[in-house]
Amino acid sequence: MNQQSSNQKSSRDVVIVEGLRTPFAKSGTKLKTVHAAKLGQVALKELIAKTNLNTDLIDEVIIGNTGSPSDAVNISRVVALNSGIPQKTSAYTVHRNCASALESISNGFEKIKSGTMDIVVAGGTENMSQMPLIMPTSITSIIERLASAKTTGQRLSALWSWFKADLSQIKEMVTTAPMAKTKYKPIISIVEGLTDPFVGINMMATAEILAKEWGLTRESQDRFALNSHLKAVAAKLKLAEEIVSIYLEPDFKEVISEDIGPRGEQTMEALGKLKPMVDKLTGTITAGNACPLTDGAAMLLLMSREKADSLGYKPLARIRGYGFAGLEPERMGLGPVYSTPVALQRAGLTMKDMNRVELNEAFAAQVMSCQRAFDSDKFAQEKFGLSNKIGEVRDEILNVNGGAIALGHPVGATGTRLVVTLMKELKRSNTQFGLATLCIGGGQGGSMVIENEG
């Protein structure tokens, strides 16, 4: 690394003025009724208030989201207008699976770096509790027939015809569990979304592949998961610096001010009792060493350095570079190992320069496999044609405040959460460089390198 070049500043540097997020809550708990657009609005309004930003100056709002609520398809525009941003300001939504909120930052980076814009809000929002059940054609066809009937008699006739024709299926539907495999079983959108369309396996199965290939034991994965919880609980006050409270409707009497996920009472014994989710006989991936489904939002304020200076803002961080890369979908968990060399090269840095790393904990096995691949000369040679390994990601710099196994992974928001957490940790620790990275369903990785300016 050329340390001198790293300290040189340019008017077109892309800097982060501030970043905030909502509490992250395990799906089905306290935030289950809060619309994804509302989650984004809470985070963005607080970001505007904290920075005392004149919203007329915002050039664009870019927000990541994967659930695409039917009543807020371009959710970025909904969040922007509900947050008091003028109608003249454009807004659009991005979707890159797990890296949607990192994609929003990279989009903002490019627009500011090119000189096209000076102020961009980038972030992500997701309510995974509200991802819908989809009715199969066996149900929708009945609804269509009823809708086309013009009289009550015709509707009753249509229902009677369906009842006689499908009596055995109706009996099976009534006498079996609601989610049993019948003709009328609804499609669980979140399950379908977490199944790879190319290789036909779910994300848990991809982690199981990595666990076997890299020789990771169940005990080691459970230990990693336990440490994630313990670190997150210990970092409660630090994480509070990035969290904005949510007052729950309709009476606004209940307030959520901290993450619902980290468990201080977690033990190896409790984790050890959980059954494998994929391979029931020899599998190692459980609900305990995987991230939970989660609801939450996160937002960043990006500016050009010259604009930040002219407005009197002192940036917290500078974006040095980012990168995305693809790999085999069935090994999608190794995505960070593929995208990080791209980001490091663009930043003019190496892994040895990184003082902190935020690597999203989709699964303990996935993070541990990444650590081994980062530190492998053989892997670097075979996959990238490099003479040496990318570089070790030491435990003491990795996810020092816990990760997604404890905090959760609201898919469309996590990329921004990683950068927010990393930026504030660099400032607290008075360290210089950090890497935020995550795997992406479908076989990709995303990485971003930032530099502390706080």
Image (tube, helix red, strand yellow):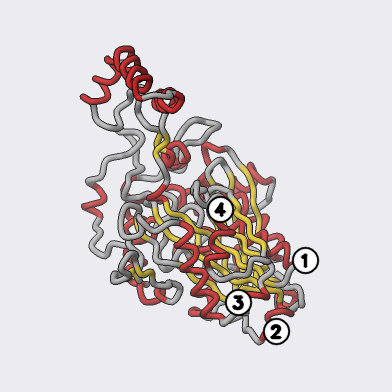
Q: Amino acid at mark 4?
A: Ala
Q: Which residue does the numbered mark 2 point to in the structure image? A: 309
The residue at the far right in this view is 115
Q: Residues within 10 Å of mark 2 (few under 14, many from 20)?
A: few
Please say if 363 is above or below 395.
above
Circle 1 SS class: loop
Task: Please say if the residues under marks 2 and 3 sit with CB atoms less than 8 Å apart.
Answer: no
Q: Amino acid at mark 3?
A: Val
Mark 2 vs mark 3: which is more N-terminal?
3
**Residue 137 visible at all:** no
Seen from the viewer's position, the closer of residues 307 and 98 is 307
Q: Which residue does the numbered mark 3 point to in the structure image? A: 17
Q: Residues within 10 Å of mark 1 (few under 14, many from 20)?
A: few
- Residue in the picture at 31% in, 60% down: 30
Mark 4 vs mark 3: which is more N-terminal?
3
Circle 2 SS class: helix
The residue at the far bottom in this view is 312
Could you tell me how far apart the alpha carbons at marks 4 and 2 are, in whole angstroms? 30 Å
Task: Give the number of the disc on residue 99.
Answer: 4
Seen from the viewer's position, the closer of residues 86 and 228 is 86
Please say if 375 is above or below 121.
above
Mark 4 vs mark 1: which is more N-terminal?
4
Q: Which residue does the numbered mark 1 point to in the structure image? A: 116
On-image quarter of the N terminus: bottom right
